[in-house]
Image (cartoon, grey):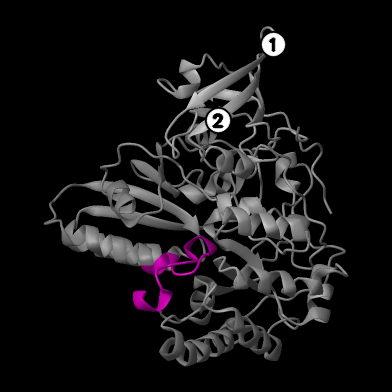
Amino acid sequence: MGKTAHIIRKIEPGSIAEEMEMEPGDEILKINGNDIEDIFDYRFLMNDSYIVVLLKKKKSGEEWELEIEKDPDEDLGVEFENGLMDDYKSCSNHCVFCFIDQMPKGMRDTLYFKDDDSRLSFLQGNYVTLTNMSDSDIDRIIRYRMEPINISFQTTNPELRRKMLHNRFAGDVFPKVKRLADAGIEMNGQIVLCKGLNDGEELERTIRDLTGYLPALRSLSVVPVGLSRFRDGLYPLEPFNGDDAAKVIDRIESWQKKLYPKYGVHFVHASDEWYLLAGRDIPEEERYDGYLQLENGVGMLRLLETEVREELRERSGDDRIRNLTIATGQLPADTIRKLCGLIREKYPQVCVRIVPIRNDFFGERITVSGLVTGTDLIRQLKGKELGEELLIPCNMLRSGENVFLDDITVEQVIMELKVPVTVVDPEGKDFCLAVLGETKGSTHRRRQMYEQTDRSSCGTPERG
């Protein structure tokens, strides 16, 4: 049996599990006589039309052997206490740019856990370095077609990669990448760019080398390193300025012009931050190749504007009166202001204040909305005229919860600011509905970039 007990948390009504009298708290021991390492073993075994489930009952401790005939694509209808059905694999690197090392002390434990788990790359879109993966892990990815896999490359210079990841094995991962490419496993790549380390000619080398993995490597994003104020004792990194950003964009766009005629894709993309920092317009939609790296901040603002324009195109407008405030990060504030201007063209009596929140918690170099804390939100808005409603983007919150990174809740913000708060989902239509007062509820979706909260038995998080 695997290391983690596969305890059932929930039974779906009308499911096979309910019919077979499975209950929350029961444990699945084996399927077809096979031990289950994780969710991918489970899903693979579920593909059979006839299965035998060995179940341990919570109440009696008895072991039941259940013979089940079903459709090949039909699931039992259970949810497990641990969604991965295994421990999360922690990172063995000590990257010079790691944001978790730049977190202040005293925050919740899950924020300090560094994952480097290929399964989370498949399930949640997390980026992995491949340094923690064995040949058998690669075998499983190929066998189960766990794709796309998102890989954090940083550089293809082995010596520099060892230095940046502070891991003597970090330069030896490229045979694994080749195996994945040869097997046709779809991949996306990321470069966290650090000034004076992997930029300039090193970036040129990395892009050139990674084009060799096309078409399996579908896309490559270049994102600037995030630097908080908690960097005492860490590698001395400097922030990029506008001129730096312009040079990065020019290099990337030069490669796009070379690659598109040959491959039909632009392949390498600069994240939105580079264009805002350089004071340049965000590229047109066609340049993003279908937004393959949207959750990595590549084309997010272009898609948002496109969706807002599409929603407004279907509306005739009216004279409704609205008076509200939108709080966002400093980086996207001008874009949000532009979108509200588009809305006002059809709804002239909708008054919206845009308040860029300065990040005092992590430091003023952090300008994205996803790292705005409840503490900064309250301090900078308290006592101000906010109108009838405050809108905040959902990426300020933990996935599915009303909690900011500093554990302040939306309810606390409402109490302190004495104004209703609406959490706005990421699509352009949701933005329009919220501004126009037509929101009927929010799911508060957020990609979990810096923490994993679904770990039932991983023990104390490691700081590396």
The percent coordinates of residue 332 (x first, y second) are 46, 64
Camera sees residue 230:
no
Res 221 → quadrant? bottom right
**As displayed, is residue 429 above or below residue 219?**
above
Based on the picture, tell me whether residue 348 belongs to the magenta stretch. Answer: no
The percent coordinates of residue 162 (x first, y second) are 83, 73
**As displayed, is residue 306 above or below residue 268?**
above
Res 159 → quadrant? bottom right
**As displayed, is residue 113 above or below residue 331?**
above
- Image point 48% across, 86% down: which residue? 256
- Image point 65% across, 33% down: which residue? 82
Q: Which residues are magenta?
A: 283-302
Q: Nearer the viewer, residue 339 or 100?
A: 100
The percent coordinates of residue 190 (x first, y second) are 61, 70
Q: Which mark is residue 51?
A: 2
Question: What amino acid does circle 2 point to?
Answer: Ile
Report the side of 377 relative to 141 (left or right): left
Disc 1 designates what residue? 62
The percent coordinates of residue 47 (x first, y second) are 51, 41
Position of the C terminus by quadrant: bottom right
Q: Mark 1 falls on what kind of element?
A: loop
Report the side of 435 relative to 156 (left or right): left
Report the side of 11 relative to 224 (left or right): left
Camera sees residue 350:
yes
